[in-house]
Amino acid sequence: MEDQTRFDLNRAIAAWREELSARPGISTEEVRELETHLRCGVDALQRDGCGESDAFARACRRLGSTSEIAAEFAKENPLRTWRGKVFWMAFAGLAIWLCREAIGLAQLLQGLLEPSTAATVVFVGALYLLPALVIAQVAMGRARGVVSLVEWVLRSRFRLLATTMLLLFLFQAGDVWILRDHPRATNIFGTANYREFLNWTFVLRGCVQQLTWLGPLLGLLVWLLPAVRNESSSRPRERVFWIANGALLLTVIASLTAPLWKLSYLVSPFLFPNFEPGYLFLQRFFFPAILASLPCVLGIAAVRGRLDSLTERFQRRLQSRRRIAMTAAIAVLASQLVSFMTWNFGGNFPLVLVYVLFWPVVWIVFITWLAPLLSEPVRKTAG
């Protein structure tokens, strides 16, 4: 009798709803509909003489466990779950671009002070560490301000496009404003008359050039946005997990395509030997757009169900932390080796090491940490 008085039906249903919301492939409206069925089942059992606790347990058994419910939804529409996954993997590209632009702007500001090498390494390390800490807070269900801001941006396609375009313009304008008084601007541009072309035309050309590779990714996000618009916000671990997977995949693809980038620089002058605008167009716009479209094509193929065997094998790999770490580490090392053999990084080795390896290691840590937790949603006790 004491256990019966301690049972709180509303708290038990709230915990069940939270666990169901954490499962992929179930929208907020569907969770509400299932909750209505659960409450109706509890009411019917109570009218038959069952107590609240027993009625709740029996009604849950009739509906099935949350994992069984999620599996049924995934079976009815298997592509819907991949729409959300691919969206957050593509969103990783937008987040990487945002972080790198912000870090680059901060480094330009720091360059005005002409710091020592040691101070530069510490400063760059701190800049890279801050986003990683914020992402970790989001994964643990904190940093609600960051989550609310992202959800606000993702409420409509127009808002996503407008926010991205505004940030793109502000970053380009900020770079030009700082470079006009930068002590190393002459070395960067190779001429002392660099102020002549640091104008609004330079800003707009920079925006268009960045859109050549950002555009395909943004198009994929705009297309898939309705798939996550009604998604429950109580899935921070799942979102961060797929963002980390997308970031690592984009890093590996970018490194593996490095020879193609270099080839485009070598081939373009031969295609247009006496027409400089032609080969500059190929180098700065055409080839970057083609290479940036490769991960987008993979994402569309996954959403369309064209990569079922590959995605199944991928998900089996995610069942073991050791498999995840080993597979990701081999992919990163192989791709970075290709990148190092293609480009001459030179310069300051500690900075190159931070720039090249820091983020891949961070993404591997997040994937290894979060993968086994996705099948273990946190359940609040009802009593």
Image (spheres, rainbow, N blue to C red):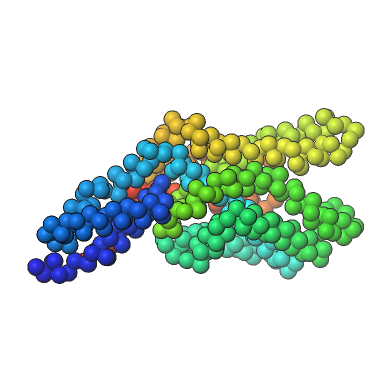
The N terminus, quarter of image? bottom left
User: Which is more toward the observer, 370 or 27?
Assistant: 27
Q: Is residue 139 left or right of residue 201?
A: left
Estimate the x, y position of residue 259 in percent, counting from the top left. Answer: 67, 34
Specify whether residue 196 is in view.
yes
Q: Residue at x 11, y 69 (%)?
A: 2
Q: Is residue 352 left or right of residue 77?
A: right
Q: Is residue 325 above or below residue 50?
A: above
Q: Is residue 56 left or right of residue 206?
A: left
User: Which is more toward the observer, 42 or 147?
Assistant: 42
User: Which is more toward the observer, 52 or 231?
Assistant: 52
The number of numbered discs placed on residues in the rendered structure image is 0
Q: Residue at x 74, y 63 (%)?
A: 174
The C terminus, quarter of image? bottom left
Specify whether residue 171 is in view.
no
Q: Is residue 323 above or below residue 63?
A: above
Q: Is residue 185 above or below residue 78?
A: below
Estimate the x, y position of residue 308 in percent, counting from the top left. Answer: 45, 32
Estimate the x, y position of residue 169 in percent, counting from the top left. Answer: 73, 58
Q: Quadrant of residue 175?
A: bottom right
Q: Residue at x 50, y 38 (%)?
A: 303
Q: Residue furthest left?
A: 1
Q: Residue at x 62, y 60 (%)?
A: 124
Estimate the x, y position of residue 108 in percent, counting from the top left. Answer: 72, 62
User: Which is more toward the observer, 6 or 252?
Assistant: 6
Q: Quadrant of residue 277?
A: top right
